[in-house]
Image (cartoon, rainbow, N blue to C red):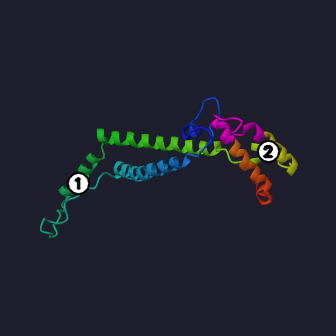
Amino acid sequence: MSGNFRDTFSKDDKKEPPLVYDDSAFMFFALTCMCIVAIPSTYFYVKALLFGVEEGAPRKSKDGHPLKVCTSATAQKHNITSRKRQRQFGLETVIKGLLLVGLWLLIAYTWESVREGAINVKGFDPFDILDVATDADDGQIKKAYRRMSKKYHPDLNPNDPQAEATFIRIAKAYAALTDDVAKANYEK
């Protein structure tokens, strides 16, 4: 093989990259992690906004004995007013809300990136690589393989990693189209 490892896997603006990978696995991982944080956080945030935070009196003493809670009308009224105060919007509530909205926007952006990436991923199509029709016979396939392999052979293009990668793709496409079972699968 001509060239070094870095040349084979580096991108050139003028040419198509030699090896195109599907990087959507990381996006799925990031999307999952963000959802694991966002869904429970949103649930508890909305619950606290609608119903307030439950901060009742302690149920047991330090010794572990159950405590009796005053059930008088005055104590009940005090509990209701304290819950109303807890539901008021403070700076902390606004900041949490803004962070959650930002997280959900990031999730939406990541979701769109994953969907867009799934559409743009190019599959392996040996007919397209060899530039032959899907109903081409063995003679046409062999002729196209010889023509393209002469053009992109690494010995004829000694310092061109792009030509080397293209030659490998041509060889794989030819191998796929000369196998009757593989050719039938690609024709479908």
Q: Residue at x 72, y 40 (%)?
A: 153
Q: Residues within 10 Å of mark 2 (few under 14, many from 20)?
A: many
Tell me the residue that label 1 is attached to: 79
C-alpha distance separating marks 2 and 1:
83 Å
Tell me the residue that label 2 is attached to: 145
The amino acid at mark 2 is: Tyr
Mark yes or no: residue 124 visible.
yes
The amino acid at mark 1 is: Asn
Position above or below: 42 against 160: below
Q: Is residue 126 magenta?
A: no
Q: Residue at x 18, y 55 (%)?
A: 74
- Numbered badge on residue 99: none
Residue range in magenta is 148-166
Q: Is residue 161 magenta?
A: yes
Q: Nearer the viewer, residue 94 or 142?
A: 142
- Disc 1, SS: helix
Q: Earlier in the sequence, mark 2 or mark 1?
A: 1
Q: Position of residue 16 (x, y in %)?
A: 65, 35
Question: Which quadrant does the N terminus fall into?
Answer: top right
Q: Position of residue 51 (x, y in %)?
A: 34, 52
